[in-house]
Amino acid sequence: MIPTRLFPCAWRLTPSSTRAFSRSRGIHLRVDKFDFELPEERIALRPARPRDCARLLCVDPNTENRFQDRSISELPDLLEPRDALVFNNTRVLAAQLSGIRHRDETTANVSITLLKPLDTSTWTALARPAKRLKTGDRIEFGSKENVCLLGVLWGCVKEKGEGGEVIISFDFQGPALDEAIAALGQMPMPPYIASRRAPDEQDVSDYQTLYARETGAVAAPTAGLHFTNELFERLEEKGISRHFVTLHVGAGTFLPVKVDDTADHPMHAEWGVVSPQNAQALNDVRQTGGRIIAVGSTALRLLESATGEDGLIRAFTGETDIFITPGYDFRAVDAMLTNFHLPRSTLFMLVSAFCGLETMQQAYAHAIAGDYRFYSYGDACLLTPSEQRT
């Protein structure tokens, strides 16, 4: 079941318990600076097996040997006792629904990807093909022959925006709607995978982290896909602690930037939580000489959103649309583990802010020449921040 209570909306919470965060403090740059050519065969269509045998490119722009080819399984040897790994424990929901649009005497096949709940029965969604829908249309998801005990799920298009965005009001609400979505929906796969092969049952487990708990993402925090129970045990034996935050990854996170200047790109807001206990624990790590290492860009973005100018991490519950580009002053994170990202994406901009654009361009060229696997099911980087990130 999809616990609706895990999708807090501002109207349901008191002002003291939520806050929105927006900070874009990089310099204005042309987006084409973040472009690069990636051979199609470098895009991973399946994850490494076992998960922790994926390759790991260690990038440290402050040393003479800036690039080292290692393995995820070597991570305990690359970190120090008292270091802290911070994971995003969001869980990917079955967000893709296929249905039949009913209008007067006509019908049409449509699909929607759920993006964000507005209340217990209403969601924002991305419709394809959007031209087949208009306000007032009824959509039938599932059928009476479906194994879903609830039978047919009906929704009504309440609003339609530009770019295929719609607001859908379902006939079910609360736990009944959660159950129907879980039964009828499919795991949403990134377009660079779905366009080359059909999603299947293996993706249901492959595209979910081992520690996923809080349902609400429409895309996986993919850096965490590399971890196994055995790797967790070895990290614990080394004295490396684990901490969990929640950021519900939205559909806009991995999209290429379509404007010419980074200043003109609107970031999609995503809901996140850093508990008071985790904020204090991470501050304690810093005070005892340990490093905070974000596992994935989503964990990093949330930690940066929760950190003040004094460098202290504070409890956070709310939405963030933080956009990190070169010139950004990092406050919370000392290193990060992340996958290889798309050209012209906000995520490649983020890692370029962390290590320097020139360093990351050279790191990606090294990875492409060395047959590293890219994107969600691909290999990873362990990044040390540049002392000069421009």
Image (spheres, helix red, strand yellow):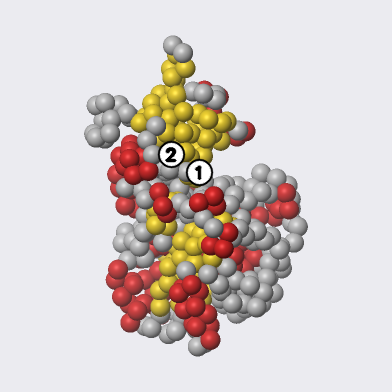
Residue 238 lies, in percent from the top left, at 37, 83
Taking the image as drawn, is residue 373 in sight?
A: no
Q: Are marks 1 and 2 in contact (CB under 8 Å)?
A: no
In-front residue for pair 70/137: 137
Residue type marked 2: Ser
Q: Tally the numbered discs.
A: 2
In-front residue for pair 62/298: 298
How packed mark 1 is, by other alpha carbons closer than 10 Å (few <14, some 14-19, many 20 or more), is some
- Name the residue tied to disc 1: 118
Label 1: state its secondary structure: loop
Position of residue 12 in the picture relative to residue 259 (left or right): left
- Name the residue tied to disc 2: 121
Residue 196 lies, in percent from the top left, at 43, 39
Q: CA distance from mark 1 to mark 2?
A: 8 Å
Residue type marked 1: Leu
Q: Residue at x 30, y 26 (%)?
A: 143
Q: Residue at x 47, y 17 (%)?
A: 103
Residue located farthest toward the right when viewing the structure as drawn: 28
Residue 77 lies, in percent from the top left, at 41, 80
Q: Is residue 114 above or below residue 100?
A: below
Q: Residue at x 66, y 44 (%)?
A: 258
Residue located farthest toward the bottom when viewing the structure as drawn: 288
Position of residue 376 in the picture relative to residue 24 (left or right): left
Q: Pick the quarter of the image with the C terminus.
A: bottom right
How packed mark 2 is, by other alpha carbons closer than 10 Å (few <14, some 14-19, many 20 or more), is some
Label 2: state its secondary structure: loop
Image quadrant in which you'd find residue 237: bottom left
In-front residue for pair 92/190: 92
Taking the image as drawn, is residue 255 in sight?
A: yes
Q: Is residue 68 above or below residue 102?
A: below
In-front residue for pair 205/158: 158
